[in-house]
Amino acid sequence: MQIEIVEMEDRKAKFILKNSSPAMANALRRTMIQDIPKMAIDKVEFHLGPIMQDDKEYESVTSLFDEVIAHRLGMIPVPTDYDQFTFQDKCECGGEGCPHCTIMYSINKVGPGTVYSGDLVPLGDNTLKVKDEFIPVVELTDNQAVLIYATAVMGTAKKHVKWQAAFGVGYSYEPIIEIDPALASDPDTLKAAELCPGLFEVKDGKLVVADKWKAVNFGSTAMQDPIPKGAIKVTWDENNFLFKFETDGSLTARQVLDKAVEILKAEADEFSAQVDALAQ
């Protein structure tokens, strides 16, 4: 199995999985969706009672229930550093919470105005400030304020979607496109370049493939009227796949891909060891 990177940006990627199988491609897809560990806010504490600021008293109430605000905070992407953080149940602190397994944030804001994700202030390490600063959380009126303490821990999407790092994970088989040489110059065949822009182009009076992966977008369009029957044949290679995915920003696309491969390898090694143990 080989991976050929086509596009690798901070929050999205495209790559070709070669010499593999549908089972392995789907295993990689599922791993990227549900098994990638990341930090997310899991516990939220709200100050109850009046809040004093600048000699003015504010009500610690908003237009939303506290549970709704807590859920919104949980969905905000939190920076994740594998070298710095681990799961609480695997931490040396025994799950009590420490700088190696938790991130503490606070929000202290008065109205009128909107509370945004950027109002989450990390306690201690400012490098852990969330990257998307303009995700709205709740609107405050003139006499309202919030004082919130939130704790982020590591988890996976198997438990809750707030720990899902990769989104829009999908793949398609590699298209194999054959153009009949005897019909490549036929005027009706050349119309495929207009029907499927980007997939075909005309060179030296003949229809040629410009980007075979565009076939995923057009389906069977290139084989319909007025294209002559048999002029274009499209089949699919079930050993090569084009993957696309995005991240929520808590991890880079490269980190998600590397971690998914690492997890798959570890699971394969564990399965192999169990099989060997049964054979003895």
Image (cartoon, rainbow, N blue to C red):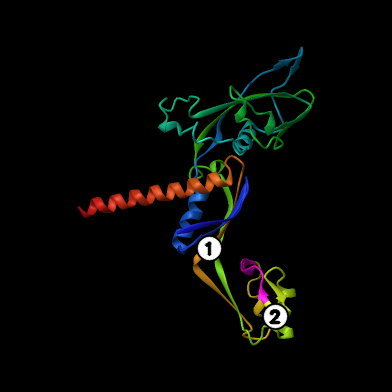
Residue identifier under label 2 = 206
Position of 179 with respect to 154 (left or right) is right
Q: Position of residue 160 (x, y in %)?
A: 52, 42
Instruction: Please give the count of numbered marks on the rendered protein.
Output: 2
Instruction: Say which residue appears at 76% left-offset and 14% top-offset.
Output: 54
Amino acid under disc 2: Lys
Nearest to the observer: residue 77 or residue 84: 84
Position of 150 with respect to 98 (left or right) is right
Region rendered in magenta: 208-216
Q: Position of residue 111 (x, y in %)?
A: 77, 25
> Is the residue marked by circle 1 packed among few (<14), some (14-19), or many (20+) residues within 10 Å?
many
Instruction: Say which residue appears at 44% left-offset and 61% top-offset.
Output: 23
Where 140 falls versus 170 (above or below)?
A: above
Instruction: Say which residue appears at 35% left-offset and 50% top-offset.
Output: 269
Where 228 falls versus 66 (above or below)?
A: below
Where 255 falls versus 243 (above or below)?
A: above
The CA span between labels 2 and 1 is: 28 Å
Nearest to the observer: residue 128 or residue 18: 18
Nearest to the observer: residue 149 or residue 240: 240
Residue identifier under label 1 = 241
- Label whose residue precedes the other's in the sequence (2 or 1): 2
- Residue 14 seen in the current view: yes
Q: Are marks 2 and 1 in contact (CB under 8 Å)?
A: no
Q: Which structural element holds mark 1? A: strand
